[in-house]
Amino acid sequence: MSKQIALLLGVHAHQPVGNFNEVIDDAHLRCYQPFLRMMNRFPRFHFSIHISGWLLANLQRKFPDDMNLLRAMVLRGQAELFTAGYTEPVLASIPVRDRIGQVNLMSERLEQAFAQRPQGAWLTERVWDSTVVPSLVACGVKYVTVDDYHFLCAGQDAAVLNGYFSTEEDGRRLDIYPISEALRYRIPFSPAREVVGYLEELASADEMPAAIYFDDIEKFGIWPETYDWVYQRGWLEQFIQGVLDSPVIRPMRYSDYHQHSRTRGVVYLPTTSYVEMNEWTLPAQPARVFSDLVNRSRQDGLYASQKAFIRGGIWRNFLSRYPESNWMHKRMVSLSNRFNQLTETRKTAEMRDHLYEAQANDAYWHGLFGGLYLPHLRRAIYHALVRLEFLLDTVNPRSPCSAIDLDLDGYEEYFLHDESVQIVVRSQGLADVLELDSYRLNHNFADTLRRQEEHYHGKAQASLASENKPAGDGIANPHEQVSFKHDIQPQDLLTDEWPRSLFIDRLVMPEQGRTAATLIRYVPTGVDTDATSLVFNALPPLQEAGIDLTKTYRIAPQTLIVSYDFHAPPQADLEVEINLAMPSCDGPAGCLEVAGEILGGFGQTHERRDVLQWVLRDEVLGGRVLFSMNQPCHFQAAPLMSVSQSEAGFEKIMQAMTLHLSWSASALIRPLEIRMTFSPL
């Protein structure tokens, strides 16, 4: 038998729920459209493709001709479709009932649109957890793809990872293809002739082996330099032609290889993802230790043999690393429970759609990719959560006040709401607002991010701004680059010692010739389910200094009212910090108006004295927030910026508008009252 090799080439297309329309249009123009049209020119080149459900619906609506082209390739047997969770959730992170619902919805939509029921499934971020096996099998899935790294972590020999293996969970069988890391780093970055030559070297006269590739289609046009490289300079056409001209390479769909080949045996994989993700899941200090281990292993020439045993964290670590991610996740799970406890006649498709949108993976994590640092992606999650909660309340009303340790931190959170506004207040410590929802505007105004240390900040601090180009031909892989999208200064890398929430209070007093600000900590006075307000008293140390402070939260229609009953020495000041998430961020669609005067945008710094009222107008939100109080304050506003990494380099992103309001005890008439009123524009 002559040598041969099956090329199983799969691509994964995805855009996060809530991404900007112009981003999707650009991705289609520079990637999805030219890729599909190039593939259509070569009917003998078989391939597989997964398009996430939210993106697919967008493409079907806006670019039907290209979706019809894909349908034609499916019907003629050239293209195979892969399923997944409809909104691209990490399946292991959502309830079992929603795993099954999401995958079935995706498969049904694909079958309706393309007349093909998928047999294979794409695992979001290639996160493997054996608990998902029964759910996938229940949905009719026969096989999935993960990295060859997963297999190496299970002790498998790299030399045999050229076919599919079988696993089981609770007696349910699922087959697994190991994606070649060597191909992931070559396609499409190395010259086409070199990739074809590499594939030919893998050919064997034994039972036909497979060269297995499944990776982001965005590498074919959206990643830096790739549009010019892949299309204008002809990489993709050269690669396809080189494969078709090869006497030993046979491009195949995964389904065809699965039908005509046998399993390579049983395997049980550990919970893991791809190598880079395992580093990203770690906090800064452990991530540095991990990175040092990897670097030493590489310097010693041992990394290839040791990398399976130098393992980082798992995807769910993001929920413990980032309190904001954990809070979104636990809110999602809680609302999933409420939705699924309804009788079938009370559930609606709109409720289900919002639940599934709230499970989209992108805003829950962060690495080189991942959108936790991107406010518009978090906003999409909260938009879905807030809308779903409102719909659930209309058919199954809650008590106006409740207390539960939702985020599993050992302390209860207080939920106080009516049909228009909801606040969630921490019971311990600062008695701050960690969620502030307007049901009319479908927005959480407390959706911001605490600035914390990231292990890659060390690279920025060292000013490693050089572009790491590969030797010889080819283009750079963003995984291997260090670059700067924005000018980063040392002050931009400061971290926060406290949460970036709303109504964080400080006592400001002279101390040993200087002014010192002390965070005020509170204890609750008690809450019951019929409560219409939340009351907190400052802890005793303040009382010993002659200071007495009671803080009260109340809700009125479309309004949050916060009052302070403040007794203090004349030299004391009360300062209130409010970190407000405004969708326009530092863009032109938001403006601040004080006393009828437009001061500027949310991304600018502002300061005024003796202010009683101001308005934040936001066209992206489609609404405004009116602040009013019964006593004038010293008003300061500034943007809260964070530094994160992306495939385009280090970038600064505005997370919130930080307001500092202060009053002197000598001029304060008790009680002080702050009102926030929410309304459409």
Image: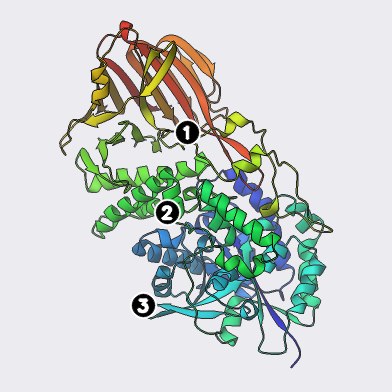
Residue position for label 2? 359
Mark with earlier residue (1, 3): 3
Q: Position of residue 20 (x, y in %)?
A: 56, 43
Label 3 environment density (alpha carbons within 10 Å; few <14, some 14–19, many ≥20): few
Camera-side residue of 236 and 370: 370
Is label 1 in contact with label 3 (beta carbons under 8 Å)? no
Residue position for label 3? 170
Q: Name the residue: 44% across, 22% down.
A: 659
Camera-side residue of 417 and 572: 572
Q: Position of residue 153 (x, y in %)?
A: 54, 70
Is label 2 in contact with label 1 (beta carbons under 8 Å)? no
Dot 3 amino acid type: Asp
* Front label number (1 vs 3): 1
Dot 1 amino acid type: Asp
* Left or right: 553 as drawn, with respect to 611: left
Mark with earlier residue (3, 2): 3
Residue position for label 1? 496
Give the answer, above or below, for where 556 lies relative to 34. Answer: above
Identify the element where label 2 is drawn: loop
Mark with earlier residue (2, 1): 2
Q: Position of residue 656 (x, y in %)?
A: 48, 31
Which quadrant does the C terminus fall into? top left
Give the spatial CA distance, label 3 vs label 2. Answer: 25 Å
